[in-house]
Amino acid sequence: MDIRNTIRHYVLENFLFTDDESKLKDDDSFLARGIIDSVGALEIAAFLEDSFGIKVHDDELLPENLDSVGSLVAYIGRKQPQPA
């Protein structure tokens, strides 16, 4: 499963309690839609660390990094080492 689908599946299952892919668009704001709150952001950070082997620092717990599927995919892309 690729990064985008892994994230989508996690959010759908753990925050929206569904497997209906149509309930979440990649650019839907988690905060604006009430999908996550500050505790949810911490849960997502822990999920990212466990699933993708990255470290989410406190100063990176920002909406621009964690507020949508698209922003999470971009954030992980910046954090993971790039192949040479």
Image (cartoon, helix red, strand yellow):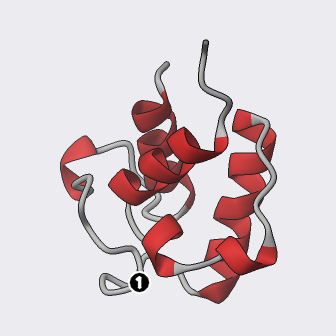
Residue in the picture at 65% in, 35% down:
80
Residue at image mark 1: 31
The image shows residue 9 at horizontal and vertical percentages of: 46, 40
Tag 1: amino acid: Leu
Left or right: where 9 falls relative to 14? left
Q: Choose top left, top right, bottom left or bottom right for residue 4.
A: top left
Label 1: which secondary element = loop
The image shows residue 7 at horizontal and vertical percentages of: 49, 44
Residue in the picture at 79% in, 68% down:
57
The image shows residue 43 at horizontal and vertical percentages of: 71, 66
Pick the front one: 60 or 68: 60
- Circle count: 1
The image shows residue 74 at horizontal and vertical percentages of: 43, 48
Which quadrant of the rendered structure holds the C terminus?
Answer: top right
Pick the front one: 21 or 37: 37
Pick the front one: 28 or 55: 55
Left or right: where 26 falls relative to 11? left
Residue 32 vertical placement versus 9 (above, below): below
Residue in the picture at 45% in, 45% down:
73
- Circle 1 packing at 10 Å, graded few (<14), some (14-19), many (20+), is some
Q: Choose top left, top right, bottom left or bottom right for residue 69.
A: bottom left
Residue at far front of view: 84
Residue at far top of view: 84
Residue in the picture at 26% in, 52% down:
26
